[in-house]
């Protein structure tokens, strides 16, 4: 019988060694963020902390999974261990299936998620005229957004700022005085266009990037599945 193909064996080894290193790197960075966060948390305990905790925990899980799979693939190929290659294959297959399921769910609920985004943005208008911490945090983010995209307010322009307009008009203010994209509001010359369409565009762009990455990843995963299966069969035939 034909033996084990050196080409497949060493590509498996090299690629999975790289994955293993990536996994370790992700894990190290995530744990480092987590540890340095703990110091911050004492000073600024707040709502925003919980969200970033979830993100870091996801990063730790992803790093650990990549590290384990990389290790299985790398060692499985080098030691020609059918058991490790099978575990690698099953793990990778599960990830691919999850990814496909998430893709199908995302596509099926696209109009639903558009609606949720729209409603969330409409809800957030209230935050612009609020004076609590949540409101202040959102106002700071929107002010930066307004400056960057030359828009003002969220859904109906400067009026969204309510009583907070006078303290926050700077990021809405037009620099050129006679300009068709600007309007007078409450004694200030500000951008006419509300920011909602820019925010929706930005979200859509990021979703395209995520889809692109997911497809690229799926191609790599399928290659990994094929290589590990071929190697698995070749070891069996030896
Ligand atoms: C977004 O939501 C608001 C209020 O719920 C609604 O009036 C508006 O028509 C919606 N826009 C889109 C594009 O769905």
Image (cartoon, grey):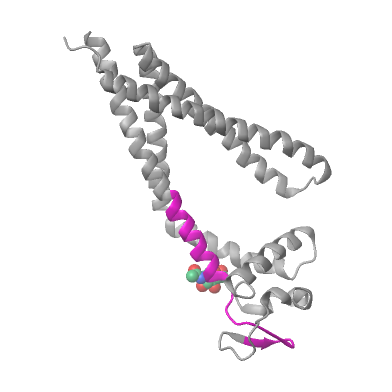
> Which image quadrant: the C terminus?
top left
Where is residue 155? Give x, y as percent: 59, 74
Residue 189 lies in magenta, yes or no?
yes
Q: In the image, is 198 to the left or to the right of 36?
A: left
Above or below, 54 against 110 in this view is above
Name the quadrant containing residue 81: top left
Where is residue 26? Give x, y as percent: 56, 34
The range drawn in magenta is 183-210
Name the quadrant containing residue 16: top left
Above or below, 101 against 178 in this view is above
Pick whichever, 47 or 44, lies toward us.
44
Residue found 62% across the figure and 38% down from its top = 56
Pick whichever, 34 or 58, lies toward us.
34
For the view shown, which residue lies furthest in the bottom direction?
178
Residue found 38% across the figure and 21% down from its top = 13
Name the quadrant containing residue 161: bottom right
Total marks shown come to: 0
For the view shown, which residue lies furthest in the left direction?
1
Where is residue 94? Give x, y as percent: 40, 30
Where is residue 100? Give x, y as percent: 37, 41
Residue 110 lies in magenta, yes or no?
no
Above or below, 55 against 61 in this view is below
Residue found 59% across the figure and 32% down from its top = 60
Q: In the image, is 148 to the left or to the right of 46?
A: left
Pick whichever, 236 or 161, lies toward us.
236
Q: In the image, is 229 to the left or to the right of 78?
A: left
> Which image quadrant: the N terminus?
top left
Residue found 68% across the figure and 80% down from its top = 173
Above or below, 91 against 195 in this view is above
């Amino acid at each position: 019988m034909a033996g084990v193909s050196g080409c497949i064996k060493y590509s498996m080894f090299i690629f999975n060694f790289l994955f293993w290193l990536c996994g370790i790197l992700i894990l190290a960075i995530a744990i480092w963020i987590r540890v340095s966060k703990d110091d911050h948390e004492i000073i600024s305990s707040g709502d925003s902390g919980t969200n970033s905790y979830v993100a870091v925990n996801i990063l730790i899980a992803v790093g650990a999974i990549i590290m384990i799979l990389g290790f299985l693939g790398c060692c499985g190929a080098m030691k020609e261990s059918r058991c490790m290659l099978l575990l690698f294959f099953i793990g990778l297959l599960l990830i691919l299936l999850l990814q496909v399921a998430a893709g199908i769910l995302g596509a099926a609920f696209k109009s639903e998620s558009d609606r949720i985004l729209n409603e969330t943005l409409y809800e957030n208008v209230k935050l612009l005229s609020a004076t609590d911490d949540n409101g202040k945090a959102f106002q700071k983010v929107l002010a930066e957004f307004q400056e960057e995209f030359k828009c003002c307010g969220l859904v109906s322009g400067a009026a969204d700022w309510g009583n907070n307009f006078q303290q926050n008009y700077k990021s809405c203010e037009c620099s050129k005085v006679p300009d068709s994209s600007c309007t007078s509001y409450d004694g200030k010359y500000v951008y006419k266009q509300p920011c909602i369409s820019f925010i929706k565009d930005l979200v859509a762009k990021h979703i395209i990037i995520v889809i692109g990455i997911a497809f690229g990843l799926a191609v790599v995963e399928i290659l990994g599945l094929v290589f590990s299966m071929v190697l698995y069969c070749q070891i069996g035939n030896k």
